[in-house]
């Protein structure tokens, strides 16, 4: 009798069980959130790398991107035991949405840690990454999406905080706002920390933050310059549309252009986290090209696993952009490195787009036109489809993607990427953003 390899068993899930699966993924995500009773140690301080044995421990509220680093996961060459401002913000939102018994304490800690990081930044809020004790990672890229996303997270969490933390959060929102107002016209490193230029994603999240601030939800008053910045960002986003290519361009005026960087899934993420309407036909045109490039057998970057998954009634899995060379694995002569793999968070974000659009269709009809035709055709919707039927088909398309994530997970644990050929997980394990993206997508599918 053939032995069963436990690690090869895959979890299949019915559509109606996705909410239940989210209940399993939430505590998995929370393992990456530090508190006063649950701390992390800086991998650089672990023996034998640190013969003095002096360790740096995490402060409460630190949210690490992943517990993976080369010494404990030999197949990766990246240390993810850091707090990314962006990743922590999207995670804090999911903690607030989960309505946990300990949620207030976790969110109070998140605010406290954000405060430590800002105090240590020297006023430069463009630091994308901080150590687990709140010091800037100075050898890393600078980004301008972090202050906006953190501001959005603080606005969402404010009502859940105790009085002292709410005061600190209001001060942090104001400092993030001042930074965005001062720097929203400047180019910086994009979402994927690879290209410096005018990022569509950054502009979209800055716009959403400013639009929320303009309603003055915390009673702080609206400083001068907000309306002008909103108008400028709206006009700037329009400049990213490439009519000839039929998609949004992710980075304008790149300092170091990469070949085949578009269509890029950060456009979909700009709708999930930013101010891009899910009903935008140009978003749909871009999303259609994204899906096509990883599902069409004739595409040079097709993921073979998507054809296998389609036979099982699930998928497809979605990556970042065509020709992506980052796989998280060690480099070197013996590394069988392959390129362009799907990501769990990208697939979940695409699923969320479908679910949000389904809700919008029920409320306002199908936004069908020439630009959106291919996007809707991919899920069986055409110009004559009624809104109720269109919504059902959009939700089914989103659920197929979420089910593929679960199917390819390691017993619900989510890494950063899946292998585009075999579907097995790869790169760093237990990526916090993967869990947060799945939880956000499941929330979007609820009525």
Image (cartoon, rainbow, N blue to C red):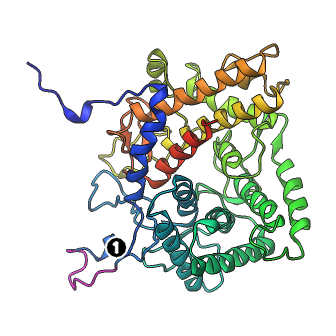
Q: Nearer the viewer, residue 249 or 173?
A: 173
Secondary structure, mark 1, is loop
Whether residue 280 sits left or right of residue 328 in the image: it is: right
Q: Nearer the viewer, residue 383 or 243?
A: 383
Please give the name of the residue rendered at 62% of the width and 40% of the height, measured from the top-left corner: 444
Residue 262 position by quadrant: top right
Please give the name of the residue rendered at 48% of the width and 41% of the height, measured from the top-left corner: 344
Q: Quadrant of the C terminus?
A: top right
Please give the name of the residue rendered at 20% of the width and 34% of the height, measured from the top-left corner: 6
Q: Is residue 71 above or below residue 24?
A: below
Q: Is residue 382 above or below residue 94?
A: above
Q: Position of residue 113 (x, y in %)?
A: 51, 76
Please give the name of the residue rendered at 42% of the width and 64% of the height, measured from the top-left corner: 33
Q: Is residue 51 magenta?
A: yes
**Main secondary-structure element of the magenta-colored stretch:** loop
Q: Is residue 302 at least partly visible in the picture?
A: no
Q: Position of residue 84 (x, y in %)?
A: 52, 65
Residue 203 position by quadrant: bottom right
Residue holding disc 1: 42
Q: Is residue 337 magenta?
A: no
Q: Position of residue 130 (x, y in %)?
A: 50, 73
Q: Nearer the viewer, residue 67 or 417?
A: 67
Whether residue 10 sits left or right of residue 157 in the image: it is: left
Q: Nearer the viewer, residue 408 or 21?
A: 21
Q: Position of residue 158 (x, y in %)?
A: 64, 68
> What's drawn in magenta, residue-wise?
47-56
Residue 336 position by quadrant: top left
Q: Is residue 266 at least partly visible in the picture?
A: yes
């Amino acid at each position: 009798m053939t032995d069963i390899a436990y690690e090869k068993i895959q979890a299949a899930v019915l559509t109606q069980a996705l909410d239940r699966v989210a209940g399993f993924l939430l505590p998995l995500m929370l393992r990456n959130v530090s508190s006063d009773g649950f701390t992390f140690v800086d991998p650089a301080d672990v023996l034998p790398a640190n013969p003095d044995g002096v360790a740096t421990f995490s402060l409460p509220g630190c949210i690490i991107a992943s517990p993976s680093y080369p010494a404990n996961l030999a197949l990766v060459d990246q240390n993810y035991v850091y707090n990314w401002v962006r990743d922590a913000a999207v995670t804090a939102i999911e903690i607030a949405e989960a309505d946990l018994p300990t949620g207030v304490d976790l969110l109070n800690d998140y605010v406290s840690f954000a405060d430590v990081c800002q105090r240590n930044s020297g006023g430069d809020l463009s630091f994308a990454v901080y150590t687990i004790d709140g010091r800037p990672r100075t050898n890393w890229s600078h980004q301008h999406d972090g202050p906006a996303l953190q501001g959005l997270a603080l606005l969402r969490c404010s009502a859940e905080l105790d009085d002292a933390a709410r005061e600190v959060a209001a001060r942090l929102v104001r400092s993030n706002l001042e930074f965005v107002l001062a720097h929203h016209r400047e180019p910086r490193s994009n979402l994927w920390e690879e290209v410096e230029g005018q990022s569509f994603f950054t502009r979209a999240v800055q716009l959403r933050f400013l639009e929320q601030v303009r309603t003055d939800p915390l009673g702080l008053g609206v400083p001068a310059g907000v309306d002008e910045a909103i108008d400028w960002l709206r006009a700037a986003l329009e400049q990213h549309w490439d009519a000839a290519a039929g998609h949004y361009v992710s980075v304008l005026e790149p300092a170091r252009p990469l070949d085949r960087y578009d269509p890029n899934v950060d456009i979909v993420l700009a709708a999930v986290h930013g101010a891009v309407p899910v009903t935008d036909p140009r978003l749909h045109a871009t999303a259609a090209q994204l899906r096509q490039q990883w599902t069409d057998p004739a595409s040079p970057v097709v993921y073979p696993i998507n054809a296998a998954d389609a036979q099982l009634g699930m998928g497809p899995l979605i990556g970042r952009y065509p020709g992506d060379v980052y796989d998280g694995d060690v480099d070197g002569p013996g590394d069988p490195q392959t390129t362009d793999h799907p990501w769990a968070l990208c697939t979940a974000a695409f699923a969320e787009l479908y679910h949000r659009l389904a809700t919008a269709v029920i409320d306002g009809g199908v936004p069908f036109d020439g630009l959106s035709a291919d996007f809707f055709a991919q899920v069986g919707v055409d110009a004559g489809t009624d809104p109720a039927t269109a919504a059902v088909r959009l939700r089914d398309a989103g659920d197929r993607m979420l089910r593929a994530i679960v199917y390819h997970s390691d017993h619900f644990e989510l890494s950063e990427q899946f292998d585009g050929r075999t579907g097995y997980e790869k790169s760093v394990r237990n990526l916090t953003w993967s869990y947060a993206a799945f939880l956000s997508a499941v929330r979007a599918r609820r009525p």
